[in-house]
C-alpha cells in the first residue's frame, strides 16, 4: 500500500508540546537516510503531517484529519502530562488502531511517565514498550530534549525508511563521527587565525600591564580571556596544547607584573592560581608530568595564601586543586601520592558547606586510584560513597559523573572476575557517555565514550561473546583513530593503544593469532613512543604489557625465539616501573614472570614461587589465578590447579576458550602435559 504521508504527528496544543512537535516535525521531514542504506533500497522521509491549529473537541474527526490518518504510514504521539485530557489526541490514536495499524504507533514521551502521559487509547496498544521514544530531561530543557530526539526518532524513521533500527542507528553514528571529524578539520584550519588573535591580545595585555593602576581592570579582563576563554576554545583543536601551554606560560609573567601593581590582590592571586592550573592540565595532556605537578603545586600555594586571607571561594578552589593534583599523580602512575592528594581534597571539601556533586567527583577519582592500587575493598567503598552522594537516580545528576562512576565500578568488578555485574555497569556507562556526547560534542567526551566501549568489549570477550565484542571494538577504534589524529594529546594515544591491545587479546582468545600479532605490534609502537616521551611509570607499564602480550601470542604462533625476546624485554621494562606503581601491577609483574619461567625456562619451581607471590597480593585477580593454576599443575599440585582453572573457566566462555588454547600451546611446545582432554573434562570444559 502506498501512503500520502510517511508520518502523522498527534499532539496537544500546549507551549512545550507544540514547540517539541514543530522541531521534531522539521527534523523528521528533513532527515536523509545515509547513502549506504539508500544504496540498499531504503527511502528518505518524504512527507509528514501535523495540524497547526487547535481544533474544537469532537467525537468525529475532520475530513482532513481522517483522510491524513488513513493515508499515513506511522503515527507519532507526543505525550506529556497534558496529553490525556485531549479527547482529540485520544480519538486520533483510536482511529489509527481501528485502521489495524496499532503496531505502527510510536509514543514520543516528553514529560511525566506512560501511566500519567499516555491517552486512554494508547494504553490499550500491546507490545508498545519497544517503540517508546523517551526524550525527557530534568527541567524540560528543550535543547537537551532535541539532542536526545535526534537518536530516539530513528525508531520511527527506520520503519519509514525500510531498514532496521540497528542498521540506521549504526550508520547514523558513523555519519555523526564524520561530521565531528569535519568540525575538527575546520578547527585546525581556524587555529592559525585564533593563534594570531591570541598574539595580538598578548601584546595588548602587556601594553596595559605597563600602565598604572587605572589600567589594571582592563589588563585583568584581557588576561582572563587568555586564561579561560581562549584555552577552553582551543582544547578541541588537535595540536593546540603546545600553543595553549605557551600562552599560559607567558600569562604568568603578565599576572605577576599586575600583582605588583594591583589594588585587588585577591583577584590577581585567583587569576594567577587558575592560570597555573590550566598550565598543569596542558602539561598533563602533553605528557610533561613533572612540569604539570610543579605548576599544580604552585596553584595550591596560591590558594593556600588566599584561604589564609579568607578570600571568598578559596576553600572550594583549594579542595579542587588537590583533586587535580591527585589526577596528575594518577595519570603518571604515582598512585600512593595520588591517594594522599585525593584524601586531602575529600577532607578539605568535607569541611566546607555541603556540595554532594563535587564531593562525589573526589570520591570517584579516589576509587579509580584505589582500583589501580589493587585495593578492591577501598575502591568499592569510595564508589558506593559516590553513588550515595549523587542519589539513586544518577540520570538526574551529571551524565559525565554518572558515566565515570559506572565505568570505574565496571573496571573494578571486571578485574575481580565478576563479569555480569561489570557488564551491567559498563553498558550504563556507555549509555550515559552517548547521551552526554549527543548534548556536548567534544573530543574529551568522545574519548570517554571510547574508554567505556573498550572496557565493555573486554568484558564481552571474556564472557565468550566474541562477535558482539568485536563489533564494539571496531566501533570504538574508529572513534579512537579519529581522536588520535591529535598527536600531541597523550591520553588519546593511550586510548588507541589500549584498544589495539584489547582487540588483539580478543582475537588471541578466539585463536586468530596472526591478526592479534599485527594489532599487538601497533599497540607496542604507540606505548613504546609514549614511554620514551614521558618516562612515567604508568606508560612504562603499558609498554611492558604490550611486549608481554606479544610474547604470549607469538608463543602460540610457535615462534618461540621471538616470544622469549618479547618476554625478557617486557619484564625488564616492567621492573623499572614498579617503584612508582601499586599492588595490582606488582601482582601482574609476578604473574608474567611466573608464566615466563614456566613456558620458556621450564623452571616449574620458580614459576610456582612467582605465581604464589602474585596470588598472595591479588587472590581475586583472574589473570593471576590462571597463571598460578598452570604453575600448580606442573609442580604436581593437580587438585589446586583444577580448582583454580575451574573457577576461572566458570566466569565465562571466553575464559574457558583461553584455557583450552593455553593448554594446547603448552603441549605443542613440549611441556609435560599428557591428558589435556581429561583435564578439561575435570574442570568442566567440553
Image (cartoon, rainbow, N blue to C red):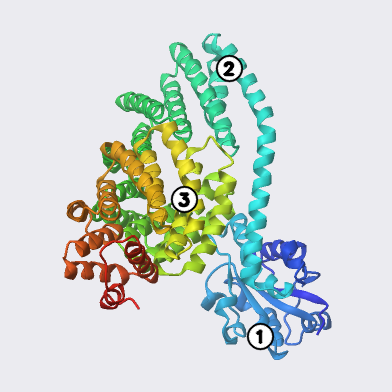
Quarter in which the C terminus is drawn: bottom left
Above or below residue 681? Residue 502 is above
Instruction: Please indicate, yes or no, whether residue 312 appears anywhere in the rendered image.
Output: yes
Q: Which-is-in-front pick, marks 3 and 2?
A: 3
Question: Within 10 angstroms of label 2, few (less than 14), some, or many (20 or more) residues?
Answer: many
Q: Which quarter of the picture shows residue 325?
A: top left
Residue topped by disc 3? 520
Residue 361: image x %, image y %?
37, 47
From the viewer's side, name the closer residue of 379 and 663.
Answer: 663
Secondary structure beneath dot 1 equals helix
Query: Marks 3/2: CA distance?
Result: 50 Å
**Residue at 70% over, 61% down:** 23
**Residue at 38% over, 36% down:** 328
Residue lying farthest to the front in this orientation: 670
Secondary structure beneath dot 3 equals helix
- Residue 102's disc is 1
User: Do residues under tags 3 and 2 come within 8 Å of each other at their CB atoms?
Assistant: no
Question: Within 10 angstroms of label 3, few (less than 14), some, or many (20 or more) residues?
Answer: many
Amino acid at each position: 500500500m502506498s501512503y500520502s504521508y510517511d508520518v502523522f504527528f498527534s499532539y496537544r496544543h500546549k507551549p512545550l508540546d507544540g514547540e517539541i512537535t514543530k522541531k521534531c516535525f522539521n527534523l523528521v521531514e528533513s532527515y536523509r537516510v545515509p547513502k549506504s542504506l539508500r544504496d540498499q533500497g531504503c527511502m528518505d522521509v518524504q512527507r509528514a503531517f501535523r495540524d497547526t491549529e487547535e481544533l474544537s473537541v469532537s467525537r468525529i474527526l475532520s475530513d482532513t484529519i481522517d483522510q491524513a490518518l488513513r493515508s499515513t504510514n506511522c503515527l507519532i504521539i507526543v505525550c506529556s502530562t497534558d496529553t490525556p485530557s485531549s479527547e482529540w489526541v485520544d480519538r486520533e490514536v483510536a482511529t489509527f488502531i481501528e485502521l489495524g495499524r496499532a503496531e505502527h504507533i510510536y509514543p514520543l514521551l516528553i514529560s511525566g511517565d506512560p501511566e500519567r502521559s499516555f491517552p486512554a487509547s494508547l494504553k490499550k496498544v500491546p507490545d508498545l514498550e519497544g517503540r517508546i521514544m523517551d526524550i525527557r530531561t530534568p527541567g524540560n530543557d528543550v535543547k537537551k530534549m532535541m539532542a536526545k530526539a535526534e537518536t530516539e526518532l530513528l525508531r520511527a524513521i527506520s520503519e519509514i525508511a525500510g531498514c532496521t533500527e540497528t542498521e540506521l542507528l549504526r550508520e547514523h553514528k558513523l555519519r555523526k563521527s564524520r561530521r565531528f571529524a569535519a568540525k575538527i578539520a575546520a578547527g585546525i584550519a581556524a587555529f592559525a587565525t585564533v593563534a594570531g588573535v591570541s598574539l595580538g591580545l598578548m601584546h595588548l595585555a602587556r601594553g596595559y600591564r605597563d600602565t598604572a593602576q587605572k589600567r589594571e581592570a582592563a589588563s585583568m579582563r584581557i588576561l582572563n580571556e587568555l586564561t579561560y576563554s581562549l584555552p577552553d576554545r582551543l582544547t578541541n583543536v588537535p595540536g593546540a596544547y603546545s600553543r595553549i601551554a605557551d600562552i599560559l606560560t607567558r600569562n604568568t609573567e603578565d599576572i605577576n607584573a599586575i600583582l605588583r601593581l594591583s589594588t585587588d590582590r585577591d583577584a590577581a592571586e585567583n587569576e594567577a592560581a587558575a592560570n597555573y592550573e590550566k598550565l598543569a592540565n596542558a602539561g598533563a595532556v602533553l605528557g610533561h608530568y613533572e612540569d604539570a605537578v610543579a605548576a599544580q603545586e604552585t596553584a595550591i600555594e596560591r590558594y593556600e595564601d588566599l584561604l589564609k586571607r579568607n578570600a571568598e571561594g578559596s576553600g572550594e578552589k583549594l579542595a579542587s586543586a588537590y583533586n587535580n593534583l591527585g589526577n596528575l599523580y594518577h595519570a603518571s602512575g604515582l598512585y600512593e601520592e595520588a591517594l594522599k592528594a585525593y584524601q586531602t581534597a575529600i577532607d578539605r571539601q568535607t569541611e566546607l558547606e555541603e556540595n554532594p556533586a563535587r564531593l562525589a567527583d573526589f570520591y570517584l577519582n579516589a576509587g579509580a586510584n584505589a582500583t589501580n592500587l589493587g585495593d578492591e575493598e577501598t575502591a568499592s567503598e569510595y564508589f558506593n560513597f559516590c553513588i550515595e552522594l549523587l542519589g539513586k537516580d544518577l540520570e538526574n545528576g551529571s551524565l559525565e559523573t554518572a558515566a565515570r562512576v559506572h565505568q570505574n565500578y565496571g573496571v573494578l568488578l571486571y578485574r575481580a572476575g565478576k563479569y555480569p555485574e561489570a557488564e551491567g555497569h559498563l553498558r550504563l556507562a556507555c549509555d550515559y557517555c552517548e547521551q552526554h556526547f549527543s548534548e556536548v560534542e567534544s573530543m574529551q567526551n568522545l574519548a570517554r565514550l571510547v574508554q567505556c566501549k573498550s572496557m565493555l568489549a573486554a568484558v564481552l570477550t571474556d564472557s565468550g561473546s566474541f562477535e558482539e565484542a568485536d563489533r564494539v571494538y571496531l566501533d570504538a577504534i574508529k572513534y579512537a583513530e579519529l581522536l588520535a589524529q591529535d598527536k600531541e594529546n597523550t591520553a588519546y594515544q593511550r586510548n588507541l593503544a589500549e584498544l589495539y591491545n584489547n582487540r588483539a587479546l580478543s582475537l588471541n582468545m578466539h585463536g586468530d593469532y596472526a591478526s592479534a600479532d599485527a594489532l599487538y605490534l601497533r599497540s607496542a609502537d604507540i606505548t613504546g613512543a609514549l614511554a620514551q616521551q614521558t618516562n612515567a611509570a604508568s606508560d612504562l607499564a603499558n609498554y611492558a604489557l604490550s611486549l608481554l602480550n606479544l610474547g604470549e601470542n607469538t608463543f602460540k604462533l610457535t615462534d618461540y625465539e621471538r616470544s622469549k625476546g618479547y618476554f625478557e624485554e617486557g619484564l625488564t621494562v616492567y621492573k623499572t616501573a614498579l617503584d612508582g606503581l601499586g599492588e595490582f601491577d606488582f601482582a601482574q609483574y609476578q604473574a608474567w614472570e611466573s608464566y615466563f619461567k614456566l613456558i620458556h625456562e621450564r623452571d616449574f619451581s620458580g614459576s610456582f614461587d612467582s605465581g604464589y607471590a602474585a596470588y598472595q597480593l591479588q587472590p581475586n585477580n583472574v589473570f593471576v589465578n590462571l597463571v598460578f593454576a598452570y604453575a600448580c599443575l606442573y609442580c604436581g599440585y593437580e587438585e589446586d590447579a583444577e580448582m583454580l582453572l575451574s573457577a576461572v573457566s566458570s566466569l565465562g566462555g571466553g575464559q574457558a576458550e583461553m584455557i583450552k588454547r593455553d593448554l594446547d600451546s603448552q603441549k605443542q611446545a613440549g611441556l609435560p602435559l599428557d591428558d589435556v582432554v581429561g583435564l578439561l573434562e575435570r574442570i568442566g570444559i567440553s
